[in-house]
Amino acid sequence: MAASKVYESPASALAGIVQDGMSVAVGGFGLCGIPEQLIMALRDSGARELTCVSNNAGVDDWGLGLLLQTRQIRKMISSYVGENAEFERQYMSGELQLEFTPQGTLAERMRAGGAGIAGFYTKTGVGTVVADGKPHMEFDGAEYVLERGIRTDLSLVKAWKADPAGNLVYRKTARNFNPMAATCGAITIAEVEELVALGDIDPDDVDTPGIFVQRIVVTVSEKRIEQRTVSGA
């Protein structure tokens, strides 16, 4: 009988996997759809010199911002980092390496890595600093830049539902970077809100097939709002 993919806690789901210097892809957009409990467990593991691939770096006291507080991240590969003052401080002081990647390019780099595609050409970024030092090629009279697919040692994602086989369903806008992150990791751990019986998820509703997911942990989400905006009285 195959070993269960379901683990009792985020810490146990990370046990035996996390190590210094590893690369980690993290799903989510802003604070939406981030694997918050797995991020805290990664912080508590004490692993250092991490390279994190994520659209953004959370905020100062939540998400990947927690790992920046403890100086566990060596390098970020990101699209948007404007909500995190500690990120700015570490980058400006030279403590943190940063590889800026346009948002759509970052999503495609992760998707390509998961699909076994080593690289692809795109117009995005041509003529800017993100294209510096990268190979260029002309197609149909237009210039393109080569971007490499991303593969990581570990991927952490957040899903709404999972079954014991690891088939995942994301909910609404939480289906952002999670599907791409789930495929580009050598090992993928999914933090989910609900575990259902095998067969309860219609195959047409599966967003990430279980073949990509090695471990599952059920958690209670703390859904914070990144920027709260209210109307005046």
Image: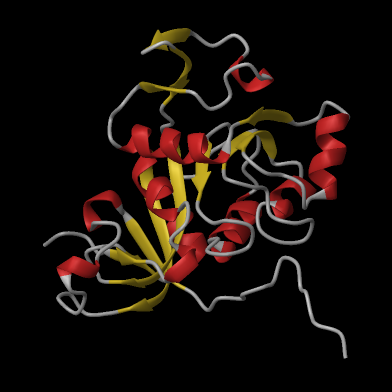
The residue that appears at 22% across and 51% down in the rendered structure is 211
- The residue shown at (44%, 31%) is 150
Residue lying furthest left in this view?
1
Q: Quadrant of the C terminus?
A: bottom right
Q: Nearer the viewer, residue 122 or 117?
A: 122
x and y, in percent, of residue 155 in the image: 44, 47
Quadrant, the N terminus: bottom left
Would you place residue 35 above or below residue 65 in this image? below
Camera sees residue 231: yes
- Specify whether 14 is left or right of 182: right
- The residue positioned farthest toward the bottom in the image shown: 233
Relative vertical location of residue 26 with respect to residue 198 in this rendering, above or below: above
Asked which quadrant contains residue 78, the reply is top right
Residue visible at 52% across and 64% down in the picture: 33
Q: Residue at x 65, y 33 (%)?
A: 49
Q: How far across and down, in percent of the image, does residue 215 sit?
A: 35, 58
Q: Is residue 80 above or below residue 201?
A: above
